Amino acid sequence: MTMGEFNTLDDFDFRGMSVLLRADINCPLNRVTLEIEDDNRIHQTMPTIRELVQKGAKVAILAHQGRPGDWDFIPLDRHAKVIGLMLDKEVPYVDDILGPDAMQAIRSMAPGDVIVLKNVRELPYEQENKTMEEQAKTELVLSLAPLFDIYVNDAFGASHRSQASLVGFPGVMPSAAGRLMEKELKALKTVFEDPVRPCVFILGGAKFGNAVKVVDRVISKRIADWVIVVGVTGNAFLKARGVILGTPSDEFLSREMTSEDMEAAKTLLLEKGGKILLPFDVALEIDCRRRDILVGDLPQEHPALDIGKGSIEKFEKVIARAGTVFMSGPAGMIEKEPFALGTRELMEAMTHSKAFTVLGGGHTASAAEKYHLFQKFSYVSTGGGALETYLLGKPLPVVEALKSAHNRKCPPKEP
């Protein structure tokens, strides 16, 4: 992928233009007060909003929060307030999308104005995944596209979805990637297409999911020189290697893995195991305390909740020699402080290295924030499902839609 395949903010003159900005500001909320607890996603898209404002655009933000029926499915008035505080100006919330209030608010904007429209998932068809051509014919696109000059998509975290607000507009109007979208794709391109060698992947987390496919792909495509597997992924590969972990760990894995997953992991270890680095010791929880033991001393009737200190030291040496390091998923159960050691130490090793370092996944990013390491990485991705889709080498519908609009230009301005 090259950035020249789609437009960015550099490709348009936004003065006086009406811009529909699709942002990903879906934030963690307090269950009791429903107030925003972490505004990082809003913060990440602010460079795009500020640039559009500074260039004299009229900006209407289209976004979502939660899903219909979920407790965090709320209006975006709180989000508008946060954006206003960050811009140091009033950002009105419009409790409408396609009705007369929205139409009036959009038409009334002056250059430099920003408004936030109603939660787009209030539309019953918004979560339907269809082709760009089909989504371009939805009421949302047919109603809003004529009111705007340019569509900007800055919602990388939702770019794996082919929904109306995400892919429909590039089918009918000039479109561009926002600065966050551009940064995400550039960072991932650096890791996946042209990494500085050696390139090390650290894959962990509490879900095994597509881990085998990801490990297989990055080794087969010669993206990664080494893959360090930790967390549940590490335990699963240890089991695939023939290690009997013990009842608690085995029971957890049985809920996460199918027999097909296990066979795939065994085959991968047999064919490409020389590139896969597994823990040789683990941390057990015994009487609410951490105890490190060698893998050879398993099975144990206590859960393995982190990699051991010996494995941490081994992996730190690999990271120290790396030119690129990508980490997705914690190395242990970071909710319990004694078992956050592996995650914290590996992250610190990344920040102390001279490598280009990228973190991916919500839990990984949250851990980096907790350990005050967030700003020390070369890049921290905002994507969850989008990042997993990218890891698997699948096309991102939003990016494909933006590519299709590459040659669509704005009509000339009236003198």
Image: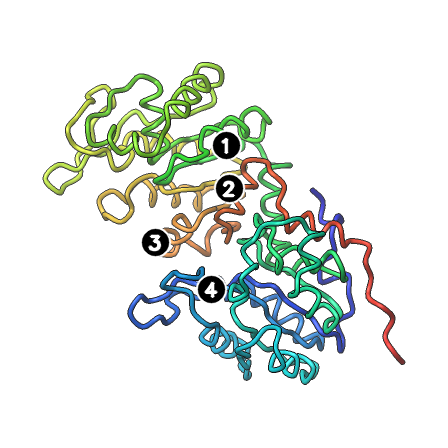
Query: Real-space Cα distance between discs 3 and 4?
Result: 27 Å
Q: Which mark identifies residue 6?
A: none
Look at discs 1 and 3 and give the one toward the viewer. Answer: 1
Query: Real-space Cα distance between discs 2 and 1?
Result: 8 Å
Whole-percent x and y of residue 290? 17, 39
Q: Amino acid at mark 1?
A: Val
Q: Residue at x 61, y 77 (%)?
A: 99
- Say if mark 2 contacts mark 1, CB within 8 Å: yes
Q: Residue furthest top?
A: 270
Query: Real-space Cα distance between discs 4 and 2?
Result: 21 Å
- Marker count (numbered): 4
Q: Amino acid at mark 3?
A: Tyr
Position of 224 with respect to 298 (left or right) is: right
- Pointer 4: what residue? 65
Image quadrant in which you'd find residue 180 = bottom right
Q: Residue at x 54, y 56 (%)?
A: 127
Is 321 located above or below residue 110 in the figure?
Answer: above
Look at discs 4 and 2 and give the one toward the viewer. Answer: 4
| Disc 3 element | loop
- Pointer 2: what residue? 388
